[in-house]
Image (cartoon, grey):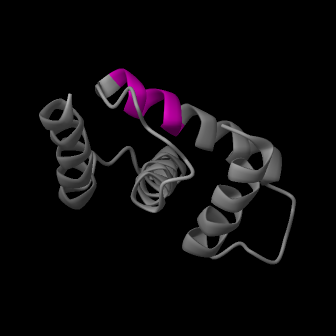
Amino acid sequence: MTDGEITSLLAMLKVDLGIHNTTAYDTRLTQILNSAHDLIVTEGASTLSASDPEDAQLIVMYAAHIWRRRDTQDGMPRMLRWALNNRIMKEKANG
């Protein structure tokens, strides 16, 4: 991901998490965004692009899940699993 893409994703993630008025977590959240991207690619979405709006939203949703589960250890929400599966199937259908 480019620096511009990361900046955009970081802004979206911070709004999602409700921490958009601080930069205290930026380094950690950037690491989580990169991890989320890599985990999605590992799942099978090898053409994932942070510049695509749908892919960007998926990365942010996954990163938000990673951030939130650090306290609860909850499993992946069904809507996130559904979105991830749809993204992977879309790629497989096109390729």
Q: Is residue 59 left or right of residue 75?
A: right
Q: Is residue 70 left or right of residue 4?
A: left
Q: Quadrant of residue 44?
A: top left
Where 56 falls versus 28 (above or below)?
Answer: below
**Is 81 positioned to the left or the right of 27 in the image?**
left
**Quadrant placement of the C terminus:** top left
Residue at the image position 48 percent from the left and 49 percent from the top: 59
Q: Position of residue 43 (x, y in %)?
A: 30, 26
Q: Position of residue 9 (x, y in %)?
A: 63, 57
In this view, 27 is above or below 79: above
Residue 77 at x, y percent in the picture:
25, 55
Give left or right: position of 40 versus 30: left
Magenta residues, start to end? 36-42
Residue at the front extreme, as displayed: 94
Residue 40 colored in magenta in the image: yes
View extreme (top): residue: 42
Quarter of the figure with the N terminus: top right
Q: Residue at x 18, y 56 (%)?
A: 78
The percent position of residue 18, horizontal first and vertical second, equals: 63, 76
Between 39 and 65, the residue placed more toward the observer is 39
Q: How many marks?
A: 0
The quarter of the picture where residue 21 lies is: bottom right
Which of the 4 quarters of the picture holds residue 40?
top left
Residue occupying image coordinates x 56% and y 32%: 35
Residue 95 sits inside the magenta stretch: no
Main secondary-structure element of the magenta-colored stretch: helix
The relative height of residue 39 versus residue 56 in the rendered view (above or below) is: above
